[in-house]
Amino acid sequence: MEAGERKKCFLKQRQVLIFFVLLGIAQAGSEPRRYSVAEEMESGSFVANLLQDLGLEVDDLAARAPRVVSKGKKMRLHFDRQTGDLLLNEKLDREELCGPTEPCVLPFQMLLKNPLKFFQAELQIRDINDHSPVFLDKEIILKISESITPGTTFLIERAQDLDVGSNSLQSYAVSPNSHFHLKLQDSSDGTILPQLVLDKALDREVQPEIRLTITALDGGIPPRSGTALICIEVLDINDNAPEFAKLHYEVHVLENSPIGSQVAIVSARDLDIGTYGEISYLLSQASEDIRKTFRINAKSGELLLTQELDFESIQTYTLNIQATDGGGLSGSCVVFVQVMDLNDNPPELTISTLISEIPENLQETVIAVFSVSDPDSGENGRMVCSIQDDLPFILKPSVENFYSLVTNTALDRETRSEYNITITVTDMGTPRLKTQHTITVLVSDVNDNAPAFTQTSYTLSVRENNSPALHIGSVRATDRDAGANAQVTYSLLPPLDPHVPLASLVSINPDNGHLFALRSLDYEALRAFEFRVGAADRGSPALSSQALVRVLVADDNDNAPFVLYPLQNASAPCTELVPRAAEAGYLVTKVVAVDGDSGQNAWLSYQLLKATEPGLFGVWAHNGEVRTARLLSERDAAKHRLLVLVKDNGEPPLSASVTLHVLLVDGFSQPYLPAPEAEAADAAPTAPLTVYLVVALASVSSLFVFSVLVFVAVRLCRRGGVGRCSVPEGPFPGHLVDVSGTGTLSQSYQYEVCLTGGSGTFKFLKPVIPNFLTKDEERVSEANPNFRNSFEFS
Ligand SMILES: *[C@@H]1O[C@H](CO)[C@@H](O)[C@H](O)[C@H]1NC(C)=O
Ligand SMILES: *[C@@H]1O[C@H](CO)[C@@H](O)[C@H](O)[C@H]1NC(C)=O
């Protein structure tokens, strides 16, 4: 306590003392004396001097032995017997002693002895401001909904102050804020109750919590204070609807994205908390298509695919997405889903017309008409149509996406009868998709190919004397067409030469072209003949072709040599005369024989088979000359008979024999002497070979002259209108007669004699190879049917 204060206090005590003294005089023994002391004074502090009040002197003290008596055991006061002062025995705490009771009075008695005297007194303990107001809860929590209207009051737990009177709690104050002010209310018991009044509506979303400090003040000097924290929690109400970050979302999604893939994430915000801020998303006002295709995760706002998108069926979706909070407020947004095309559709090809078989040789024929389509869009739907390059077909675009497949050139079934045309439609997308369709076109046959013989001419060879109906060979023709157009029928064509009895010579099998000789052929009568065969197909119209067939008749050794000279059937056989003076090698005669055959079969050899006198005559094997072998003598018989065998070279050989009569004469009379003999006689006897050559040449020449003369005679005979000259009866009538059989001439040397009509001159002797007629010759032979490639022999 300060000195000033203590002085004041002291003055006060004195006044009180004086008052008590006066009072004691007036009412001794009835009214208690009153003293007062401030609380919290140190022990031993002076309260009052009681000497006066007790009516004692200092000297009396020892005798009267005054002492303080109080209730209870505690001796809070004691009396100083030296000074007569009443002192505090201990520090007094008013609040402890009296609490809120005011005034706080501590009654006590003073007891005096000698005489015993009882003295009532009271000690009033005065309050000092030794306690601050205290809030029992240092933190006051208030939960106020944001919906509370301004003006509402909230009672705050009051603070306590143990002091009383003016030292007790006097007022409250609250820290400055924008929402509340403090209102103090006096209660019936006189305490002040603090109240918070809401000035302005709360908004949890702006300020979810407000902290205020409340201060309680007492009335002490200086005042003491205590504070507490008011924590106001703003309770949420659902005053905010969910709000989407964007009202309009636009997303592009590839078609065929896998099921479950994320299309978009929408997100809405709700400023409220708790269930009021819990947002769940849903598709609102969704069509059936949308419901089937999309799903939204109610919690996360993820928009997912529940089935694959197909650009070709739906290209855009507009989704309304609603976000609802736990309090039922909602907001919405729009998601615009654009499906992006993927090249997932191969082009399609639809054939509307198709001809699977076309005849060959047609120009520009439409085979097929087809259309192509691709449901994809853009490049993915742009198509290119093609076929193989190497085919005689082209694609012609007609109206949009329609094509016709047309032949480029006339087709030839014989070159190729079947085409596999692969139509490829490719789109331009990535990756490129294509569709292929194969059309098989058959080319049907048209009879555009005539049968063709394997050879333009056939040469067949038949041995004469064949058995009838002998297969002598075949002709064959092929036809490149098909079916009936390729079925070949063979036939013999009418011979150009009406004299050839073709129908009786050969026949042909119409089906296979086999040729048959109808009858036995005779080389000597007909060495060769030719005819035409035809081959026709069964098309309509039918086509045909021809070929030439030559039949060569091969010789057989079927004719024996025939002796022309000397004549064998003469009634008087001719006799050769030989002078006895003839030298050795004298040509007696010559056996002349012919053979109807040809070639080897006509090569004749002569042989002396028998002679009356062997060794006198010899026969030259090659020419049939009969000559003397030695000089004749007188002893040789006059008549001789020689048997000469003429043999051909055939296999087996055939032969004829001739008998010669030779008469040896002495004086050779002129008529018997042949002219050549004379020449031979003129020749030098030392050169018999020369003589022989001359003789041979002469005989050949004479034979030839003889032949010519015969021809001339025959010719003149016919021109003379006598009719046909008689020809030697032979086995082969007709105009083809062998003339090779002179025996000494090779078959290779035939001669053609052409007699120009009327002129009577020769176009002489053209050697010809035994061959068939050339055309020129044919013409000649038509002009002169009697003279063909051989001359007649009559
Ligand atoms: C055409 O196709 C068919 C069937 O695939 C086949 O048998 C035939 O040989 C083909 N033709 C050609 C000419 O490729
Ligand atoms: C002898 O034969 C030839 C040829 O065969 C014949 O022409 C002639 O008349 C025949 N002569 C006699 C007398 O029989």
Image (cartoon, grey):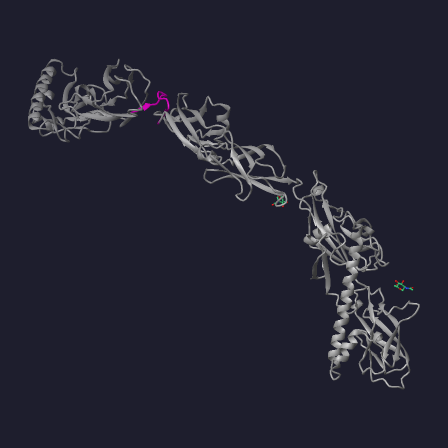
User: Which quadrant would the C terminus be assigned to in this image?
Assistant: bottom right
Tell me where residue 773 sits by quadrant: bottom right
Q: Please give left or right for residue 552 compared with residue 154 in the image.
A: right
Q: Is residue 312 above or below residue 549?
A: above
Tell me where residue 183 sits by quadrant: top left
Question: Residue 636 colored magenta?
Answer: no
Which residue is at the front of the view, 590 or 387?
590
Q: Is residue 175 above or below residue 575?
A: above
Q: Please give left or right for residue 397 compared with residue 707 in the image.
A: left
Which residue is at the front of the view, 179 or 268?
268
Question: Residue 243 colored magenta?
Answer: yes
Which residue is at the front of the view, 28 or 218?
218
Bounds of the magenta segment: 232-245
Q: Position of residue 410 (x, y in %)?
A: 58, 39
Q: Residue furthest right?
A: 571
Residue at 84 percent across and 72 percent down: it is: 646
> Visible in this render: residue 71?
no
Q: Please give left or right for residue 387 compared with residue 107 in the image.
A: right
Q: Position of residue 192 (x, y in %)?
A: 23, 17
Q: Position of residue 569 (x, y in %)?
A: 91, 67
Q: Is residue 94 above or below residue 618?
A: above
Q: Is residue 419 above or below residue 570?
A: above
> Visible in this render: residue 582?
yes
Tell me where residue 707 sits by quadrant: bottom right
Residue at 52 percent across and 43 percent down: it is: 389
Q: Please give left or right for residue 293 compared with residue 547 in the image.
A: left
Q: How many tags in the picture?
A: 0
Q: Position of residue 229 (x, y in %)?
A: 25, 26
Which residue is at the front of the view, 347 or 96?
347
